[in-house]
Amino acid sequence: MIVKAEDADTNEFHGVQFDVLAVGDESMVTKMHLKEGNDVPSHSHESEQSGYVISGTYRLHIGDDDDLIAGGDSYSIPGGVEHSYEIIDSGEIIDVFSPPREDYL
């Protein structure tokens, strides 16, 4: 499946806008548009989430751990684990979810 940029669906989660880029049977790719001060509250979901930071600076809380991440960094969050983002500098992140998140479709 190929999804052209102009065909990507736009959605929102806790005030964060994102594009649903490609969705397969076992995974989905999203591009998050994160704005400073619009933090993502603690939440969990059944999907494993792996991400790559394109730009921006964030404090990522995963369970009891937290760290500052920025452009070029990546992470993986197991399904069912509480996590949140403090958005320090606006930017973009590519996230891959497996299985696809039904609430994002």
Image: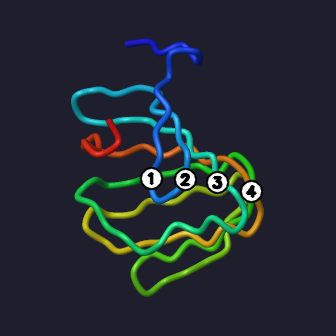
Nearer the observer, disc 3 or disc 1?
1
User: Residue, x 55% and y 39% (percent of image)?
Assistant: 31
Looking at the rendered structure, the kind of residue marked 3 is Leu
Please give the residue where the numbered disc 3 appears in the rendered image.
34
Element at label 1: strand
Looking at the rendered structure, the kind of residue marked 4 is Ser
Sequence-earlier tag: 4 or 3: 3
Please give the residue where the numbered disc 4 appears in the rendered image.
90
Looking at the rendered structure, the kind of residue marked 1 is Phe
User: Residue, x 49% and y 46% (percent of image)?
Assistant: 95
User: What quarter of the picture does the C terminus occupy?
Assistant: top left
Question: Do labels 4 and 3 touch, CB within 8 Å?
Answer: yes
Sequence-earlier tag: 3 or 1: 1
Locate residue 14, reporting x and y percent: 46, 59
Give whichever of 42, 100 is nearer the camera. Answer: 42
Looking at the rendered structure, the kind of residue marked 2 is Val
How far apart, in angstroms, are the residues tagged by discs 1 and 4?
16 Å
Question: Do labels 1 and 4 touch, CB within 8 Å?
Answer: no
Res 95 label: none
